[in-house]
Image (tube, rainbow, N blue to C red):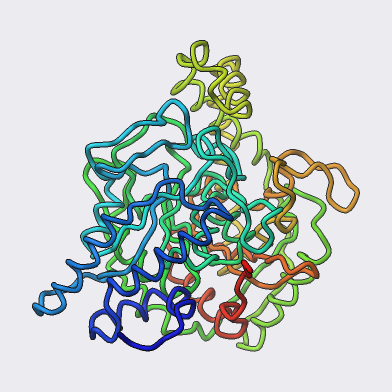
């Protein structure tokens, strides 16, 4: 066995892990055992995994090593330990959706995204925690409880992919599959100090479908510590599927090759409000503005853009509440006391919302599409903060005030939902740290289908402002 520090191996990039596994400098089983050992130590502290599959992982790792020794053709993610958010079907592995309604549900099939990861050779470590049906931007539920932030266990990890982001930050999941219905990849990635990517809607198919809740606005995507790892994972996940009518044709882009090049010219517009929020924490603003200035060294033009999106929260919550009511309204009477109160409220609002409100939400959504179309006629990239605040106290669902000013329940994450409604590609990348040592995230948004440019800008920023030397402490 190679003499390497166990923590260094757990925090190694997935790309490097894959290369070492292929040469057998390190075996998949050695890496897997080290990460399992770390999960057993760290997970009781942060509650990132809700279900672990260690026996399966060891078996998959052994088979991965045997395939290397036999000289077989290897997948892009061969032997790399990976976690799956507990909103995705996993054959033979409990999938609860963070809900008492599915507390003992064991699916008989994998989702398409999970199938693709398995085909690419992953080693499955287990399922990561999520709020009930991913309905809120923190991670807490009645089945498994709350996921804590690795940087400060008295703070939230964000959500709804909070388990995935916390696991990635804590060095217990080199690759994590998350989902994003209104910021659920980007928000926890921001609060936990990792990279999260949401592609153009439809590039990663979702099948089988689970009802209508978030159906037209939810994306799947990678959460990683390195941009290159996310590009590698996206190479595996993307591409059409016949059963998902909204999946897009293959783009024939190798995103690993794409991030090797840097655009020579770029016009970046940035906004600290988007017309949806008027106040952000000073340390967040400072970190984002300093990060934008760092991009000017490449000759890229950056300027404050006049972006004023209208009715984002109205449209977003109409889709969320009406979808929740349609899918789960019939279960409310029997299961009310076993459903998260916040989700009960969503269902109840949806049940009392007039039908015309759904068309109104679509009209508002199309208006947001038009505003972003106009923006991208003049700019190549939009940059915003990912969230208005760093990670806040456990037990809270939202922040009531920012800098002493009252904000709506969505005020703290108001930058993310618009890009689910529009389906534009967007990433959150760490861009600084507060005086309390909490991560700050910057959101990078591209025009429709221009996922490659979002990756390129993210990779360039990672190179000038790397963050991976910072690690949470659990002593």
The front one of 116 and 261 is 116
The front one of 38 and 366 is 38
Quadrant position of the N terminus in the picture:
bottom left
Residue 272, image quadrant: bottom right
Total marks shown come to 0
Residue at 29%, 62% in the rendered image: 123
- Above or below, 65 against 418 in this view is below
Is 252 left, or right, of 465 in this rendering?
left
The front one of 331 and 234 is 331
- Above or below, 242 against 46 in this view is above
Q: Position of residue 437 (x, y in %)?
A: 73, 69
Q: Position of residue 423 (x, y in %)?
A: 48, 50
Q: Position of residue 297 (x, y in %)?
A: 65, 88
Residue at 79%, 56% in the rendered image: 280
Task: Specify the farthest residue to the right.
Answer: 404
Residue at 52%, 11% in the rendered image: 333
Quadrant position of the C terminus in the picture:
bottom right
Residue at 31%, 73% in the rendered image: 254
Residue 83, image quadrant: bottom left
- Above or below, 423 against 267 in this view is above
Residue 102, image quadrant: top left
Is 286 left, or right, of 341 in this rendering?
right
Is 329 left, or right, of 108 in this rendering?
right
Q: Position of residue 438 (x, y in %)?
A: 71, 65
């Amino acid at each position: 066995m190679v003499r390497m520090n166990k923590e260094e191996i757990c925090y190694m990039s997935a790309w490097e892990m894959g290369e070492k596994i292929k040469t057998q400098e390190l075996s998949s089983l050695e890496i897997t055992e080290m990460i399992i050992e770390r999960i057993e130590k760290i997970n009781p502290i942060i509650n990132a995994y809700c279900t672990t599959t260690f026996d399966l992982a060891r078996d998959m790792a052994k088979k991965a090593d045997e395939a290397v020794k036999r000289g077989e053709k290897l997948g892009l993610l061969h032997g790399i330990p990976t976690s799956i958010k507990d909103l995705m079907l996993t054959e033979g592995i409990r999938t609860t959706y963070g809900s008492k309604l599915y507390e003992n549900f064991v699916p008989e099939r994998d989702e398409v995204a999970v199938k693709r990861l398995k085909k690419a050779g992953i080693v499955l470590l287990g399922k990561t925690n999520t709020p009930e049906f991913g309905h809120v931007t923190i991670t807490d539920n009645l089945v498994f409880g709350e996921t804590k932030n690795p940087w400060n266990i008295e703070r939230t990890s964000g959500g709804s992919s909070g388990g995935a982001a916390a696991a990635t930050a804590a060095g217990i999941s080199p690759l994590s599959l998350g989902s994003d219905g209104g910021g659920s990849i980007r928000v926890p990635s921001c609060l936990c100090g990792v990279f999260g990517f949401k592609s153009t809607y439809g590039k990663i198919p979702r099948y089988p479908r689970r009802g209508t809740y978030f159906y037209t606005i939810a994306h799947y995507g990678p959460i990683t510590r390195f941009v290159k790892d996310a590009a590698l994972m996206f190479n595996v996940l993307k591409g059409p599927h016949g059963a998902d009518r909204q999946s897009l044709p293959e783009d024939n882009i190798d995103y690993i090759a794409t991030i090797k090049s840097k655009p020579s010219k770029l016009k970046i517009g940035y906004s600290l409000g988007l017309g949806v929020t008027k106040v952000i924490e000073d340390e967040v603003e400072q970190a984002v503005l300093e990060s934008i200035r760092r991009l000017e060294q490449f000759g890229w033009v950056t300027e404050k853009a006049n972006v004023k999106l209208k009715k984002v929260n109205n449209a977003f919550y109409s889709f969320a509440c009406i979808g929740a009511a349609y899918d789960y309204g019939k279960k409310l009477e029997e299961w009310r006391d076993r459903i998260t109160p916040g989700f009960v409220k969503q269902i109840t609002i949806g049940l009392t919302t007039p039908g015309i409100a759904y068309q109104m939400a679509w009209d508002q959504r199309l208006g947001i599409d038009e505003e972003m179309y106009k923006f991208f006629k003049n700019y190549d990239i939009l940059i915003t903060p990912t969230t208005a605040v760093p990670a806040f106290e456990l037990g809270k669902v939202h922040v009531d005030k920012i800098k002493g000013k009252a904000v709506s329940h969505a005020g703290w994450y108001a930058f993310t939902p618009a890009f689910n409604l529009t389906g534009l590609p967007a990433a959150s990348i760490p861009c600084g740290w507060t005086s309390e040592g909490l991560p700050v995230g910057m959101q990078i948004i591209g025009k429709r289908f221009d996922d490659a440019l979002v990756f390129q800008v993210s990779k360039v920023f990672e190179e000038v402002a790397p963050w991976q030397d910072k690690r949470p402490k659990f002593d």
